[in-house]
Image (cartoon, helix red, strand yellow):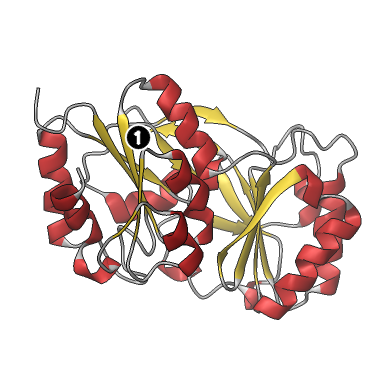
Amino acid sequence: MGKYTGKMIISDLDGTLIPRGGVISAENRQAIADFVAEGGLFAIATGRTPEAAAGYVEGLPINAPSVFFNGAMLYDWAAKKVLKTMPLTAGDTDNLWPAFAQRALAEFPEACIEVYTADNCHIITPAANDDPRLPHEYYRYVHTELGNLTDTVRTPWLKFFACDKHEHLEKYVALAEEMGVAPLANGFYSEDNYYEFVAKHVSKGAMVAAIREQLPGVEIIACGDYLNDNEMLAEADIGVAAANAHPETQKVAKYVGCAVEENLLAWVVKEIA
């Protein structure tokens, strides 16, 4: 028994645990190590795949179920085992998602559009459109013809992602409504120029609820910085937003801590846990 036994911290990555474009600070690493050494449980919640997160969190003592694809996957980090997936295309009996993807390719020629499956990130737009973040990521991605992904029973889609100018994404969201895929999904901005679709009722918050069922009685402290973190912060016992988080995310949080660049996780362990 340690002083953090019965407590769990689950943290978003980009903009919360990691400054955008940066790495996890030594202060945050030490604070998390101390928290776990004293009985605490630590997990991450991200829109990334497990592979994509691995390069950033290498060496962290992740010892609780973690959330990927913004809630479409629950994953046992230590065992490298998928615990649960909630595919975007599971309820799409009319195969509307491939049709929507085809229209998006035609109507948004500047976009970078990505289809995430359990084992890969498939970019269905030309390489010239690639999001500048991609060469700096720690995961594999392939450029794939949409036609190779249209059998969504054989290859379920977990997430559909577009990177484009915000004003273009507003039209993209309207197209999803027009074609009837929006009601099948949970859609949200994860950055000003990123819009994502996961399955309806899927979110980081929904997976935190699933974690709570696995770990009854554990007090959950959730940390985040952007709109896709809001449900997680609301579902947790204690929600913490970074000082430079989106204003709406700060409103949801019980506490607003320091800026991510000032070692937010170390602040949480010291002031909240």
> In terms of depth relative to the viewer, which is nearer, 151 or 187?
187
Q: Position of residue 117 (x, y in %)?
A: 62, 43
Describe the element under mark 1 as helix, strand or loop: loop
Horizontal side of 120 relative to 253 (left or right) equals: right
**Residue 178 in which image quadrant:** bottom right
Residue type at mark 1: give it.
Answer: Trp
Q: Position of residue 247 (x, y in %)?
A: 47, 68
> In terms of depth relative to the viewer, which is nearer, 93 or 268?
268
> In terms of depth relative to the viewer, which is nearer, 36 or 7?
7
**Residue 258 in which image quadrant:** bottom left
> In terms of depth relative to the viewer, which is nearer, 83 or 35?
35
> Label 1: which residue?
77
Image vertical order of residue 177 relative to residue 155, above or below: below
Image vertical order of residue 106 relative to residue 221, above or below: below
Q: Residues within 10 Å of mark 1 (few under 14, many from 20)?
A: many
> Which residue is located at x 78 percent, y 43 percent?
184
Q: Position of residue 38 (x, y in %)?
A: 10, 33
Q: Quadrant of the C terminus?
A: top left
Horizontal side of 134 relative to 98 (left or right) equals: left
* Residue 259 visible from this viewpoint: yes
Horizontal side of 187 relative to 9 (left or right) equals: right
Q: Quadrant of the N terminus?
A: top left
> Which residue is located at x 77 percent, y 67 percent?
172
Image vertical order of residue 156 relative to residue 109, above or below: above
Q: Position of residue 53 (x, y in %)?
A: 39, 51
* Residue 140 visible from this viewpoint: no
